[in-house]
Structures are given as structure tokens and as C-alpha cells.
Image: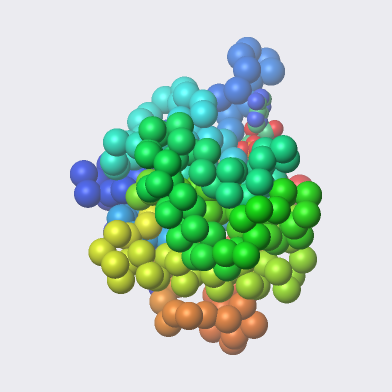
Amino acid sequence: MTSTTTTPGSATAAVALSGVTKVYGAGADAVVALDRVSLDVAPGEFVCLVGASGCGKSTLLNLVAGLDTVSGGGIRVAGDASPGLMFQEPALFPWLTVNANVELPLKLRGVPSAQRKARVAELLDTVHLGEFGKRRPHQLSGGMRQRVALARTLALDTPVLLMDEPFGALDAMTRDILHDELERLWTSRKAAGRPLTVLFVTHNVREAARLADRIVLLSSRPGRVIYETDVEIARPRRIDSAEVATIAAEVTDRLRAEVGRHGH
Ligand SMILES: Nc1ncnc2c1ncn2[C@@H]1O[C@H](COP(=O)(O)OP(=O)(O)OP(=O)(O)O)[C@@H](O)[C@H]1O
């Protein structure tokens, strides 16, 4: 089903982008990365942003994260704290143990020591790493390191999570497991009345159909929202299910048409 009901800038949205434009550089070298992008993400909604390479997905996420400033339009993120952020590289501190990596944001926020230890144990259990707190990042697999990064991001307890190709560097099997874990975590937060809003960038259309409540497709240079579709498949899902394949094929067709239009 194609969704056309989004009202940009809705007051109840967890993330609201309204006519966002981003231009890098100036004059003849200017690159319009995003052109009047409007998008509302509802509280607790899981939105996947897909599009061809260079269409502005990371730019959009960085703007929502507050890492860069818009050239036009506006962005509003609900809540007082900055959103949690996760990238393809886990960016852990190699000299710190897993425990200390996850504890760091709590320490920086001034959470008392006893409370911190309890929270770290709880978070590592959530990502199935309860046994690995004393290890250092280099002693873990890529999937485990990404789980530590997820636990560290969750330590901030922010209502909004921004993820930029977080599983892009992992093998398919590990990625599947992490999809399951992320979905489980997201579902349990919803059940607990603390919905987690996720804006997830990927160029893997199947991954988007596996995870998203809604898939948003951006056009290439300049990036504009050209297509949206609600993914109404019951959870938990499987990436190899027929329903996921159908949605993925639909989005891939749109993406191919867009790439064809640009010749890259
Ligand atoms: N700091 C920058 N300075 C100049 N141009 C930039 C900068 N960052 C991104 N761009 C350009 O803006 C456009 C969008 O880039 P962006 O990285 O957001 O795309 P993307 O969709 O995330 O790409 P990919 O899927 O390959 O990661 C590209 O044309 C890119 O070259």
C-alpha cells in the first residue's frame, strides 16, 4: 500500500523533517544532496530509508542527528536528548573492555556507579553478551562488536535511534540474527510503553522489507522522497519469507527505474 497521508511537520511526530534542503559547497561546485525533503516518523515507528548510492541517505541521517546543519527547511526531534546513533563501524574504544564501552555514556551523564553497573549488565544481557563484559573489542567477532555498539547506544535511553547501514559489514547469517534481535528489542520497548522510534538507512531492500513499518525511497541527486510504502507484515518476520520478498521486489523495481533514469 502506498502511503500518502503523511503530514510534514506534524506536532506528534518523533522526527519531523519539513522541506529539508542540503547543499554542499557553493557556486559551480555546489552539490544539492537533499531537495525539500519532508518526512514524519511517528513515535515507535520503524522507518527504513533506501535509495541508490549517493542519494543523500547519510546526509539526511546526519542532519537529524544534529551532526550537520540544513541549508533550508527544518527538522524537529522529539525529546530532550539527542538521538542515539549507530554506524556501519561499531567505533568502540579498543583499550576499554566491553563493560567500560557500554558504561561510558552513563558515566558521562553522571549516573552513579552502582546504578551504572546494573544497567550495563542489563544492556549486555539484552544483546546476548552477558558473558563477554570483560573482553576487549578485538576479542569479539564483528557481529558481537556491533551488539556492543547497540548496547552502548541503548544506554543513552533515547526515544529515537538513528542507524546508518549498521549491519552492512556483516555476513548474511550474522545480519539475520541481528535483525531478529533488533526487532525483538524494538517490540519489547513498544510492549513496555517506551516505544523506540527507528530511522534506519540501508541500500539493502530486503533488509528494509524485513525490518520496516514503512520504507521511504529517495531519488538520486538531488535526494527527494519519490515513493513510500507501508510494510504490513506480521512480526516477527523472516528475511526469506514470501511476503518480505514481494515487498522487496516492489521497492527494487522502483529503485531500478530511478537508477535507470539517472544512468548510475
Ligand atoms: N561533506 C560533503 N561535501 C561535499 N559533498 C558531499 C559531502 N557529503 C556528501 N556529499 C555528496 O552529497 C551526496 C549525498 O551523499 P550521501 O553520503 O548522503 O549519500 P548516501 O545516499 O548516503 O550514499 P551511500 O549509499 O553511497 O552511502 C553525494 O553526491 C555526495 O557526494
Q: Which corner quadrant of the image does residue 179 belong to?
A: bottom right
Front one among 258 and 210: 210
Asked if residue 80 is positioned above or below residue 167 in the image, the reply reads above
Q: Residue at x 40, y 46 (%)?
A: 114
Indicate the quadrant of ligand 1 in the picture. Answer: top right
Is residue 195 left or right of 68 when viewed as pictured? Answer: left
Front one among 232 and 83: 83
Count of numbered tags:
0
Front one among 63 and 71: 63
Is residue 191 left or right of 20 when viewed as pictured? Answer: left
Asked if residue 87 is positioned above or below residue 205 in the image, the reply reads above
Q: Which corner quadrant of the image does residue 64 belong to?
A: top left
Q: Residue at x 29, y 41 (%)?
A: 79
User: Residue 53, can we see it?
Assistant: no
Q: Residue furthest bottom?
A: 242
Q: x and y percent of residue 236 in the render?
A: 48, 80
Front one among 66 and 84: 84
Q: x and y percent of residue 119 in the render?
A: 43, 53
Q: Residue furthest front?
A: 114
Q: x and y percent of residue 122 in the render?
A: 45, 60
Q: Residue at x 49, y 58 (%)?
A: 121
Is residue 80 left or right of 184 when viewed as pictured? Answer: left
